[in-house]
Image: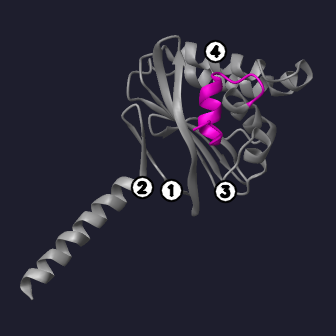
């Protein structure tokens, strides 16, 4: 009887370990939880992948939503809070990162749309301009909080006031999910549309 009990307990241990392993997705050594919570809402990992620049790994990113989405419009329409998390796989000057984010928005917006975003873009540029360089392992997040707006968190600290306009969050997401994304393969990975 004791032997059976010991065997049963060891199987429970194996199953618990397996389920803990199954609850994360690893991308370039960065672990993304398959589920998380934001402001009391459960979010699921929509997709995760790597941004490359030539042969170099730049960062790993994961997109969390309340329901699976396969396009930018579906991501924006998904109810509740949303989160994009980015972990650096190499160093970059923070001011340069801010400029690259702005360029990513510019690549996906018309001039009329861009002109409405200028105050937010200036403020976002200032956030990154005041940060020390991002090093391997540093993280930033862009979250949409209903009733508040877009929140930018760098290295675990919220930066400034939320960007209230929903259009600004859509513009930010267009960097990765728009018609001219930063990296096509990463867009497919974040949207879970990557061919297997």
> Is residue 26 toward the left or the right of residue 48 in the image?
left
> Is residue 107 toward the left or the right of residue 53 in the image?
right
Q: CA distance from mark 1 to mark 4?
A: 31 Å
Judging from the image, what secondary structure is the residue with disc 4 in? helix
Q: CA distance from mark 4 to mark 3?
A: 31 Å
| Residue span colored magenta | 178-196
Instruction: Give the mark, 2 or 3, whose residue is nearer the N terminus.
Output: 2
Q: Are marks 1 and 2 in contact (CB under 8 Å)?
A: yes
Q: Residue furthest right?
A: 112
Q: CA distance from mark 1 to mark 2?
A: 7 Å
In the image, which is nearer the foreground, mark 2 or mark 4? Answer: 2
Instruction: Give the mark, 1 or 2, whose residue is nearer the N terminus.
Output: 2
Query: Residue 137 at what x, y percent from top left?
Result: 38, 29
- Residue underneath mark 4: 99
Q: CA distance from mark 2 to mark 4?
A: 35 Å
Q: Is residue 181 magenta?
A: yes
Along the viewing direction, whichever of 131 and 170 lies nearer the viewer: 170
Residue 62 seen in render: no
């Amino acid at each position: 009887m004791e032997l059976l009990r010991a065997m049963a307990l060891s199987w429970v241990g194996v199953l618990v370990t397996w389920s803990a392993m199954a609850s994360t997705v690893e991308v370039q050594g960065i672990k993304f939880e398959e589920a998380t919570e934001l402001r009391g809402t459960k979010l699921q990992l929509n997709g995760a992948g790597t941004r490359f620049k030539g042969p170099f790994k730049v960062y790993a990113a994961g997109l969390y939503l309340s329901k699976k989405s396969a396009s930018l419009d579906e991501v924006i329409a998904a109810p509740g809070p949303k989160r994009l998390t980015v972990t650096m796989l190499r160093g970059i000057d923070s001011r340069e990162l801010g400029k690259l984010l702005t360029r990513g928005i510019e690549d996906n917006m018309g001039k009329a749309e861009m002109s409405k975003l200028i105050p937010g873009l200036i403020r976002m540029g200032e956030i990154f301009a005041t940060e020390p360089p991002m090093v391997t392992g540093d993280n930033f997040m862009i979250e949409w909080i209903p009733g508040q707006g877009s929140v930018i968190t760098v290295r675990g600290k919220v930066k400034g006031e939320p960007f209230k306009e929903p259009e600004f969050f859509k513009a930010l997401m267009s960097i990765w999910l728009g018609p001219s994304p930063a990296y096509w393969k990463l867009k497919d990975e974040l949207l879970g549309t990557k061919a297997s």
